């Protein structure tokens, strides 16, 4: 706008100047005419004579076209600024005006009329072109008068935003204030009494129990899924190369497992051919405990179910009136847990129920009256039995839903024994797939084979044909090789005993030949690497040549018969070095749960060792054949 | 009492910043955080849980909300909603 105004002004000025010029030129003309006339009238004849002489001598004079000069200079001026500078032209005009006067007297010649004009020469400087170097996308010309500059616009916008923010904040604060006004009104409603009432209501207790378990399980996530791998972090991956074992977790509860020792450990399921996905809980471990001598009011026997993902507290805790010596999950029911006690009772717990046993056997002559150290479940889903043997040699078989009385009872006795008939059974083993013949280990260190039922050629009870003699102390563990894989090793079994050794035996089938009674069977091989009582031995469920042992010195050994038969391939001190009581492999063979005498359950991962290779079976076959041949050759040598 | 012991055990675990137990009205029953923060968590989280629950059941009428886990830059908020109560646990995840 300003520019326009300026332009207008300039134009007006120009117009004025032009007018002024024209006026002046007119005036000048008039003046010049006057000037012309005046010298002619005032003339003088003398002048005329002189002029005549000069003119005749020199000639005519050309007329000086001063006007054209003016015109051109006029044309040179543009619109715009024009500063009229009048340069003094009087001499030219006057000189121009004088000469032609000389030629005036001669009337005959054609004398052009000369007029003297006051030429005003304008000197107009070139218009200054002001160029704006603004970088804009549009090619809008810069004729528009410039609005507020960019920076100004930015500032304005900022101010607007700031204003909006303030408004928003104010609104929020107002809302918050309202809320806070509301809250203090509400909070006093939840008085202390109400709180106490809520805290003690059974509903609330159950809610706390349930949700705290879920939250604790969720908390134990070691993997951070938000991890940014693009950042350079050198995390050592926990790869187990070859021969190392790793402690996965340790379970104990201050309230329940303190001052008690673990008497048995088991995983949630054993290896079975038919697997129903939703019934297996491979992360659950069950462990049983004996009594706490310091806590007289607490129940004597405790059974805890631990979840690998819940490290701090047991999933379930079950009570019993007397020490629980052996415990297992029911192989065929995911919810049932069976335990054998010091009093001879067999107890059944249900995870869906409370802490006391759902069913129990009677403390009468029908069942056991001596401590039950061993139990096993045999059969199939539809027809299964629980076999329990107590230290007085009584073997009972039970139906799980009817624990009121045993299905059958069998007294195991060995009449040929010099001192007593009774066989004090401390270990029991059924070969895989067998339901009739079983092997028992006794307090004296002898292993006998027994039958549950009378069959053709054998009676029920201990088979007196063979005695497996080799150990010098009570047998603490007996385990048959699990049946799987291309080669059948299920005739092999391991025993471990208080005499610091682990022995490998081959079961003798009942031979039809007449053999004198009391034939002694010697072990195939003896493992001598222990430093203390060996409390448990178990074959690995996945690798044919691997088995684990636990000792009283706190050592957990893993042996691999394909690598070395003299020493264990892996060995570690577990926990604080207290005696380890029981060992149990998980279904995948990778994890081993170890129960120690200080009440802790340790879970170890043995890593890649657990997966067998195809040749492992063949190698083991060869090893076993070697052992057999050495045994038969060196049968005269005494094993120790 | 057992309830107190559970809360104490939960809150004494490493990485756990606090435990808040809320009833269905959004009123705080117990909190191991300081009272004002606990109240804030109580009201804010119960609103959030209500919205989440509604959204879940609207998406599928047979479905229901069982667990809510909010992962933030600084920590992780785990909410276990039951019928009448709400348990909120705030922990800093392992990585940090």
Image: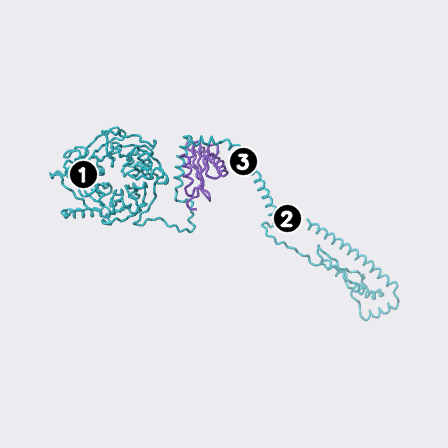
Chain letter tied to cyan? A
Q: Are marks 1 and 3 in contact (CB under 8 Å)?
A: no
Q: Which residue lies under the disc numbered 2?
A: A148
C-alpha distance separating marks 2 and 1: 108 Å
Label 2: how many Cα within 10 Å (few below 14, some 14–19, many 20+): few
Element type at mark 3: helix
Q: Nearer the viewer, mark 2 or mark 1?
A: 1
Q: Which mark is residue A180?
A: 3
Q: Nearer the viewer, residue A544 or A198?
A: A198
Which quadrant of the structure image shows residue A550? top left
- Which chain letter matches label 2? A
Q: Is residue A564 above or below residue A253?
A: below
Element type at mark 1: strand
Label 1: how many Cα within 10 Å (few below 14, some 14–19, many 20+): many
- Which chain letter matches label 1? A
Per the rendering, the colour in which chain B appears is: purple
The reply to the same-chain question for discs 3 and 2 is yes
Element type at mark 2: loop
C-alpha distance separating marks 3 and 2: 46 Å
Q: Which mark is residue A448?
A: 1
Residue A510: x and y, percent? 15, 38
Decide if residue A605 is in sight here.
no
Residue B32: x and y, percent? 46, 38
């Amino acid at each position: 706008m300003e520019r326009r105004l300026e332009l207008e002004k300039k134009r007006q000025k120009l117009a004025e100047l032009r007018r002024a010029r024209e006026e002046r030129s007119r005036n000048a003309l008039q003046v010049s005419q006057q000037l012309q006339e005046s010298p002619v009238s005032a003339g003088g004849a003398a002048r005329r004579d002189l002029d005549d002489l000069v003119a005749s001598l020199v000639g005519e004079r050309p007329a000086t076209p001063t006007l054209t000069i003016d015109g051109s200079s006029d044309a040179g001026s543009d619109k715009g600024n024009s500063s009229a500078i009048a340069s003094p032209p009087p001499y030219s005009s006057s000189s121009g005006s004088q000469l032609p006067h000389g030629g005036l007297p001669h009337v005959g010649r054609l004398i052009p009329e000369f007029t003297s004009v006051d030429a005003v020469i304008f000197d107009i400087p070139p218009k200054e072109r002001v160029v704006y170097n603004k970088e804009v996308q549009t090619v809008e010309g810069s004729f528009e008068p410039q609005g507020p500059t960019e920076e100004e616009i930015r500032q304005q916008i900022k101010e607007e935003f700031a204003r909006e923010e303030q408004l928003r904040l104010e609104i929020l604060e107002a809302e918050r204030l309202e809320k806070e006004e509301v809250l203090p009104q509400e909070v006093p409603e939840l008085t202390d009494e109400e709180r106490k009432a809520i805290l003690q209501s059974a509903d609330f207790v159950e809610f706390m129990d349930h949700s705290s378990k879920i939250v604790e399980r969720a908390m134990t996530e070691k993997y951070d899924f938000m991890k940014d791998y693009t950042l350079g972090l050198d995390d050592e991956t926990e790869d187990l190369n070859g021969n190392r074992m790793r402690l996965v977790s340790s379970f104990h509860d201050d309230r329940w497992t303190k001052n008690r020792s673990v008497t048995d450990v088991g995983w949630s399921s054993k290896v079975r051919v038919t697997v129903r996905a939703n019934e297996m809980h491979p992360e659950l471990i069950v462990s049983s405990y004996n009594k706490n001598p310091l806590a007289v009011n607490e129940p004597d026997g405790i059974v805890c179910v631990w979840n690998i993902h819940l490290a701090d507290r047991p999933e379930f805790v079950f009570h019993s009136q007397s020490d629980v010596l052996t415990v297992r999950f029911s192989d065929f029911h995911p919810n049932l847990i069976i335990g054998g006690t010091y009093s001879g009772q067999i107890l059944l717990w249900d995870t869906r129920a409370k802490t006391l046993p759902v069913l129990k056997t009677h403390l009468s002559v029908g069942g056991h009256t001596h401590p039950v150290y061993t139990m096993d479940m045999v059969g199939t889903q539809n027809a299964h039995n629980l076999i329990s043997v107590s230290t007085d040699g009584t073997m009972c078989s039970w139906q799980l839903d009817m624990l009121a009385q045993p299905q059958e009872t069998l007294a195991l006795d060995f009449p040929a024994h010099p001192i007593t008939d009774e066989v004090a059974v401390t270990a029991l083993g059924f070969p895989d797939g067998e339901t009739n013949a079983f092997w028992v280990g006794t307090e004296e260190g002898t292993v006998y084979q027994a039958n549950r039922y009378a069959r053709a050629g054998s009676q029920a009870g201990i088979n007196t044909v063979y005695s497996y003699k080799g150990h010098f102390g009570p047998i603490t563990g007996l385990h048959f090789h699990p049946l799987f894989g291309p080669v059948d090793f299920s005739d092999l079994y391991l025993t471990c005993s208080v005499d610091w050794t682990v022995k490998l035996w081959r079961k003798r089938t009942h031979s039809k030949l007449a053999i004198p009674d009391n034939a002694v069977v010697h072990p195939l091989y003896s493992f001598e690497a222990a430093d203390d009582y060996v409390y448990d031995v178990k074959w690995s469920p996945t690798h044919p040549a691997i088995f684990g042992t636990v000792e009283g010195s706190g050592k957990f050994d893993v042996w691999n018969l394909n690598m070395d038969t003299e020493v264990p391939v892996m060995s570690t001190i577990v926990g604080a070095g207290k005696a380890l009581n029981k060992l149990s492999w998980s279904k995948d063979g990778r994890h081993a749960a170890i129960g120690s005498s200080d009440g802790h359950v340790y879970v170890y991962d043995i890593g890649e060792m657990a997966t067998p290779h195809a040749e492992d079976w063949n190698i083991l076959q060869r090893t076993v054949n070697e052992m057999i041949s050495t045994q038969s050759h060196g049968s005269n040598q005494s094993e120790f | 009492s057992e309830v107190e012991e559970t809360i104490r055990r939960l809150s004494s675990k490493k990485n756990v910043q606090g435990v808040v137990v809320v009833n269905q009205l959004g009123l705080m029953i117990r909190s191991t955080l300081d009272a004002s923060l606990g109240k804030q968590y109580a009201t804010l989280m119960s609103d959030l849980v209500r919205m989440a629950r509604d959204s879940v059941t609207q998406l599928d009428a047979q479905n229901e909300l069982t667990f809510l886990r909010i992962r933030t830059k600084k920590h992780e908020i785990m909410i276990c909603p039951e019928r009448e109560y709400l348990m909120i646990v705030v922990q800093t995840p392992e990585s940090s």
